[in-house]
Image: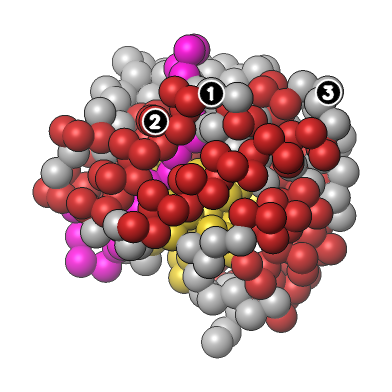
Amino acid sequence: MRVGIDSYSYHRRYGEVRIGERAAPGRPWALEPGPVLAHARGLRVEDLYLETCYLPAPETITPGMLDAGPATAVGLSWGHPWPDGTYHGLDGGRSPGAEEELVRWIRAAARLGHPVMRITAGSPASRGMEPAEDLVARLVAPLRRAADRAAAVGVALALENHGDLRACDILELLERVDRPNLGVCLDNVNLVRVGDDYLEGIAALGPVAHLVQLKDCLPGDPTIAGGPICTSLGEGSLDLAAQLAVLAGSGFDGPVCVELAALGDGPVDELAMVERSVAWLRDNLPAA
């Protein structure tokens, strides 16, 4: 396994404030990757996934704009619904516009030499109370089209369990879409937000995962709006060692990315939290 960061960890710095959060001090960062690249370069992580909502238009991005140094492979993470008016991933298969936007980013990933791109099918807000079987059925065709477009340019897609789909739903989708370049981006906390068990969900999705987004959090109800309050890895209530052991047992050997989501209403320093989390991963990822 490799140590990585997902740039959603810096969402407050870009001006996105989740439910119950305090805004970051100072002026928000511009929608460009420079500060994240510099932080990742200093930490010498092996992988960095950049949320496309914090980037300029895909057609304007050049390889030089995404240089995190020789130690770090960079990838794109598409589908977060920010700012207001942005698609919730594929909008649950309801929106041709969302498919068109995804294709633009797939083309960018291919042009930039990124072999794996994280995507989402939707979000808790875009799903609402719709039955899972209806959502899954409607997503088959757009996911198949997206996978085919990506395969044509040598890109694999990693579908996140984004608080909208249970592990069993994602596995059914993968089976019905039936494309070898469609895998999973596994988020440990999003498993329990939809009713899955941490360890069972990791065991189910680990064998088809391209990457992992790892969180730790304070005790409490994980199903609250916005999700539980994140801590640095190893400083919260989760048994991450057990989760990583199950992940290793599934055969996963890709990037494990620090991701900070809900940060609560107190003063926090997400840069320091990311740094401590990277150090924890280096000390605790299972050996090959």
* Mark 2 / mark 1, whichever is N-terminal: 1
> Does the residue at mark 3 contact the one at mark 2 (Cβ under 8 Å)?
no
- Mark 1: amino acid: Ser
In x, y percent, where is residue 270? 48, 37
Disc 3 target residue: 129
Residue drawn at 15 percent across, 50 percent down: 63
Give the label, 3 or 2, closer to the camera: 2
Which quadrant holds residue 116? bottom left
Q: How far apart are marks 1 and 3 (CA)?
A: 18 Å
Highlighted magenta segment, given as a residue range: 67-86
Task: Indicate whether residue 230 is drawn in magenta.
Answer: no
* Mark 3 / mark 2, whichever is N-terminal: 2
Query: SS class of the residue under badge 3?
Result: loop
Disc 2 target residue: 100
Disc 1 target residue: 95
- How many tags in the picture? 3
Task: Indicate whether residue 74 is drawn in magenta.
Answer: yes
In x, y percent, where is residue 69? 20, 60
Q: Quick one: 40 or 110, which is closer to the camera?
A: 110
Query: SS class of the residue under badge 2?
Result: helix
- Mark 3: amino acid: Met
Q: Please say if 76 is above or below 51.
A: below
Which quadrant holds residue 103? top left
